[in-house]
Image (spheres, rainbow, N blue to C red):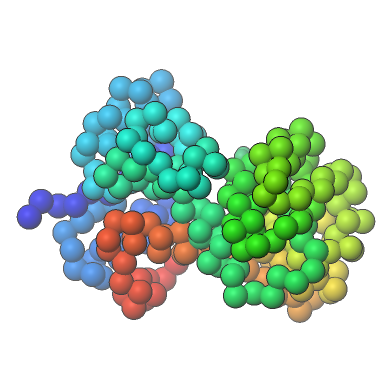
């Protein structure tokens, strides 16, 4: 049997969590498969992507191609179309599993109370969609660039009520909420978020998958924290299900 090829289409080149974890997992389930970083320069994308789509059994798509990939596919799921972002492909169909990763990482938590979301990029969009699917009908949103928050409010019009607050007011607003969700990558290089946590918070969710100053602070205050590894884990589970390769027991054995 031919080797099954998987990969992540990205630019610039980087070693993704997917590349490390999926290759270990393929060994664990004993299949002849490989997962590669596929680095495509933006000026080459249009003529290289068709070959990639033909030659790989399953793909992930990441920055900066999640939207640009649409026109090369036969179909996409409703959520991927709503989010204008595809991160997983199988047999010419595009999926968005980012929001499902968020959804499954938080679904068993107590989400009573007010929620503050920081950030208005791609991750924020997937997370707001996940919150909407959980049944949350109202959140506060803060972003450094106010206009991007307005774009999200327009997109989610009718799905979830978004109250936009000014970035400068973050340390007042945080005192009025119960749950804080950081969707920005701040903290990845040990940067501190300009936010002062307090012990009244019941949950801090951080999309960054390292142990950031935000998470350390939350833990020191006794606040439950969820780290981005959980979101990654559950979106990876979803990818494996789409590619018909999921084995829970074996996947749980892989250290993230
Ligand atoms: P992603 O897909 O990871 O969400 P993105 O679409 O580039 O990436 O969005 C990054 C988010 O992090 C944005 O909300 C961005 O704020 P702006 O819209 O103002 O750019 C936020 N962000 C990035 N660096 C930041 C910083 N130094 N301070 C505050 N917010 C920052």
- Asked whether residue 192 is in view, the answer is no
Name the image quarter holding residue 219. bottom right
Q: Which residue is pictured at 84% across the width and 74% down the height? A: 199
Quadrant holding the N terminus: bottom left
Q: Which residue is pictured at 85% across the width and 73% down the height? A: 200
Picture mark count:
0
- Asked whether residue 132 is in view, the answer is yes
Q: Which residue is pictured at 71% across the width and 70% down the height? A: 111
Name the image quarter holding residue 31. bottom left
State left or right for residue 79 relative to residue 48. right
Locate residue 17, reporting x and y percent.
Answer: 43, 56
Q: Is residue 146 above or below residue 36?
A: above
Name the image quarter holding residue 195. bottom right
Quadrant holding the C terminus: bottom left
Locate residue 177, reporting x and y percent.
Answer: 84, 64
Locate residue 181, reporting x and y percent.
Answer: 70, 59
Q: Which residue is pictured at 40% across the width and 64% down the height? A: 237
Locate residue 85, reporting x and y percent.
Answer: 50, 40
Ligand 1 lies in which image quarter?
A: top right
**Farthest front residue?**
158
Q: Is residue 43 above or below residue 130?
A: above
Between 133 and 37, which is closer to the camera in this rendering?
133
State left or right for residue 66 relative to residue 150. left
**Farthest left residue?**
1
């Amino acid at each position: 049997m031919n080797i099954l090829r998987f990969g992540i289409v990205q630019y610039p080149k980087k070693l993704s969590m997917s590349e490390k974890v999926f290759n270990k997992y393929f060994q664990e389930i004993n299949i002849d498969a490989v997962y590669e970083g596929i680095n495509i320069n933006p000026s080459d994308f249009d003529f290289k992507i068709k070959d990639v789509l033909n030659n790989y059994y399953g793909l992930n798509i990441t920055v900066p191609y999640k939207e640009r990939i649409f026109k090369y596919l036969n179909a996409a799921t409703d959520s991927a179309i709503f989010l204008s972002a595809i991160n997983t492909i199988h047999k010419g169909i595009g999926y968005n599993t980012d929001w499902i990763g968020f959804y499954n990482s938080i679904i068993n938590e107590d989400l009573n109370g007010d929620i503050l979301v920081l950030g208005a990029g791609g991750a924020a969009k997937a997370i707001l969609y996940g919150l909407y699917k959980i049944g949350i009908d109202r959140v506060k949103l803060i972003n450094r660039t106010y206009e991007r928050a307005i774009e999200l409010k327009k997109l989610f019009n009718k799905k979830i009520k978004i109250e936009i607050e000014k970035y400068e007011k973050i340390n007042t607003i945080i005192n009025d909420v119960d749950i804080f969700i950081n969707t920005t990558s701040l903290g990845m290089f040990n940067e501190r978020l300009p936010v002062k946590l307090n012990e009244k918070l019941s949950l801090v969710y951080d999309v960054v998958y390292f142990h950031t100053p935000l998470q350390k602070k939350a833990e020191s205050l006794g606040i439950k924290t969820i780290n981005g590894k959980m979101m990654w884990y559950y979106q990876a589970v979803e990818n494996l299900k789409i590619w018909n390769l999921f084995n829970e027991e074996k996947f749980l054995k892989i250290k993230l």
